[in-house]
Image: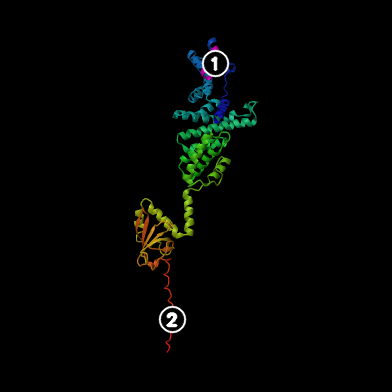
Amino acid sequence: MLVRKTKAIVAVVLGLALGLGAAWGQAQQKQEWKDRAEYDLYMAISKEANAEARLKLVDQWTEKYAATDFTLLRLQTYLATYQQLGRTADIVRTARSILESNPKDIRILSTVAYFTTALPKPSPDDLSAGEKASQGVLELLDAEFTPEKKPATVTEADWKKSRSATEAMAHRTLGWVAMQRKEYEAAEKAFTRTLQANPEQGEVSYWLGQVILYQKKADRQVDALFHFARAAAYAGTGALSPQGRQQVEAYLAKAYRTYHGDESGLKELHELARANVFPPAGFDIKSREEIEVEKRQALAKADPGLALWVSIKENLTADGGQKYFTENMKDALIPPEGMVPFKGTLISHDPAKNPKTLVLGIQDPGQADVTLKLDTAMTGVAPAGTVIQFRGAPESFTKEPFMVTFEVDKEAVTGWPAPAPPAKRAPKKAAPKKTT
């Protein structure tokens, strides 16, 4: 679809067609053919429908009549032929040659501007030429698209649409040139302008997402994700090919998970991007960091002891964990007085009765991460699963397997079940009296 639409636009912009030799001859009345053979050669060219065969004839014209009064006509013929053959580099080179004699021709300027973005390996000179041509197109828009110049066969609506399409094309090339130069902010501005002029450009939405991402601004990542979603979701005129949309969709899903943490909200993003060209006011996607902060805030409110332990464990398991333990935890009272104590689930104790060592799981009731070394033995026994609260002084720490050992005063431990009272003995029965 994109290729067919491109050819149609270019044909209109160029206004070229084979068989216009008579019209050109009338327009250039002071020019003359060198001889009858030159004229016959051109007529053969104008009647040749096969582009490859026609190109050979035009090359013959160049070889036999290097000097001709119809140099511009020959370049125009080359241009139309290269267009049919899809030879992008030759199209741009020939159009630039035409501009040397007529730099204000908006059709040829549009040709250079449009096909610059299709060059496989554009040189700095190619980029400069495409930029200059695009700027020339924008400068000529008002003068070219006047009511007086509108063809009688073209409706007012189509005339305005042609102007918008030409303007969008010029901004598209300016954005593409800036993107090749890694001038990403300039590229963003140009791509925004082209989508404002013509929203039917799925590829530009993708490019816009790229140049926003390349600016490496954390607060702009959500905008980039939106434009990737738009490129993947948009299916109207000017959309990416089905395969291209699938590739963008796969990239979007990965980038979304990296930023957000999972795919929750991705479906809603697609729907939003399908209905809007640009992110609507108030658009936002929470980052995984923001989500984590919210979770921590909620946990700190619901269970401040657990929130403190989660923070401690993250610091201990990160690089420099041992240094963190030595400088911030060892021999300090944790949690300090005034804060709620830690709460853990008993996994085991030693010895089996009247233990002085308790092993608890704080973050996960089934995963041991704390060992309590008591100054005085607890009384009796406690079943696994008993919830114990404590505060104490960390003595040592191991990262693999993870374990923090606390020295704890018995008085700082709560939740240990009280020993069962001794069983009551049955009262002794009085001895029977002896009878005589």
| Location of mark 1 (residue) | 45
Please determine whether, in this image, residue 433 is positioned above or below residue 215: below
Residue picked out by circle 2: 429
Q: Quadrant of the C terminus?
A: bottom left
- Can you name the residue that lies furthest to the front here? 436
Q: What x and y, as percent, mark residue 341?
A: 42, 63
| Kind of residue sitting beneath label 2 | Lys
The correct choice, above or below, for 269 with respect to 151 in the image is: below
User: Residue at 52% of width from left, 42% of height from top?
Assistant: 226
Indicate the secondary structure of the residue bearing disc 2: loop
* 270 with respect to 395 (left or right): right
Q: Residues within 10 Å of mark 1 (few under 14, many from 20)?
A: many
In the rendered image, residue 364, in percent from the top left (x then y), is placed at 43, 56
Q: Is residue 177 visible?
A: yes
| Real-space CA distance between mark 1 and mark 2, rounded to the nearest whole angstrom | 136 Å
**Residue 220 seen in render:** no
Left or right position of 375 against 113: left
Magenta stretch?
39-54
Question: Front-most of 409 and 350?
Answer: 350
Name the residue located 63 percent from the left edge and 26 percent from the top edge.
151
Q: Pick the residue in front: 221 or 236.
A: 236
Residue 179: image location, x then y, percent: 47, 35
Seen at 47% across and 34% down, the residue is 178
The N terminus lies in quadrant: top right
- Residue 119 in picture, x, y percent from top left: 48, 28
Q: Nearer the viewer, residue 304 or 90?
A: 304
